[in-house]
Amino acid sequence: MTALLRSTFATTLCLGLIALTGCATDAPEQAVRPQPLMPYTEDSPSAEESPAVDPREEGESEDLLAEIADADYASWATAPGYESLRPAAGPHGDQVQIFLDPKAENALETGADEWPIDAMIVKDVYRDGELEDIAAMKKTSQGWYWGEWTADGETVVEGLEAEPCQGCHSAGTDSTMAVDLR
């Protein structure tokens, strides 16, 4: 067994050296001269001219589950009619409870025409009395950022323009179904 390992090691070492040094050739070497660098002539925007980029615009994950958990969403106000578990109408379990962050709560109380940027709505989804999923939506400058996770925190869906969230919710007022601003 030791002889086999030595032979394999020697073969690997030889192949590696050949790859690094190349094959020998009788042709004379020709010097390669680097090409001069050409200056870039197009104007590029300065840092002051470039707007800040919201990572959500680039499709990056917002980690909405961590955000709502850190904010202790279950301590937020409940949506009218959802002060306790209520029968679900739609694809989310058989019972739900809906929570509004302070921005969403204020928009509802003041009769806003649309949800403000950064407003969040969270729905706890129950099946047979057990928490099955957590669904959340957060208003961004690009539209709603959607997320749904199992009770164990596994991602079901998350992102801007997430389907089937966006497809169903587009029928609602400013993409909300159970909580209407008007």
Image (cartoon, rainbow, N blue to C red):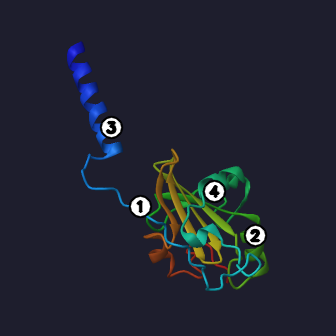
Is 142 drawn above or below residue 34 in the view shown? below
Q: How many marks?
A: 4
In this picture, residue 7 sits left or right of residue 127: left
Write the residue at 46% across / 66% down: 33
In the figure, is residue 30 to the left or right of 36?
left
Pointer 3 or 1: first along the chain: 3
Dot in front, 1 or 2: 1
**Residue ID at (48%, 68%):** 89
Q: Which residue is mark 2?
A: 103
Q: CA distance from mark 1 to mark 4?
A: 80 Å
Structural crowding at the residue carrying mark 1, measured as other residues with C-alpha within 10 Å and reported as few (<14), some (14–19) or many (≥20): few
Q: Amino acid at mark 1?
A: Ala
Instruction: Answer few, some or many: residues within 10 Å of disc 2's Cα (few below 14, many 20 plus, some between 14 and 19).
Output: some
User: Quick one: 118 or 180, which is closer to the camera?
Assistant: 118
* Residue 52 in view, yes or no: yes
Residue ID for mark 3 = 17
Q: Specify which label sits upstream in the sequence, 3 or 2.
A: 3
Circle 3: element type: helix
Residues at discs 4 and 3 in contact (Cβ within 8 Å): no
For the C terminus, which image quadrant? bottom right
- Asked which secondary structure carries label 2, the reply is helix
Which of pointers 3 and 1 indicates the residue nearer the eye? 1
**Circle nearer the N terminus (4, 2):** 4
| For discs 1 and 4, the disc positioned in front in the rendered view | 1
Q: Position of residue 79 (x, y in %)?
A: 67, 66
Q: Quadrant of residue 146?
A: bottom right
Quarter holding the N terminus is top left
Name the disc covering residue 84, or none. Answer: 4
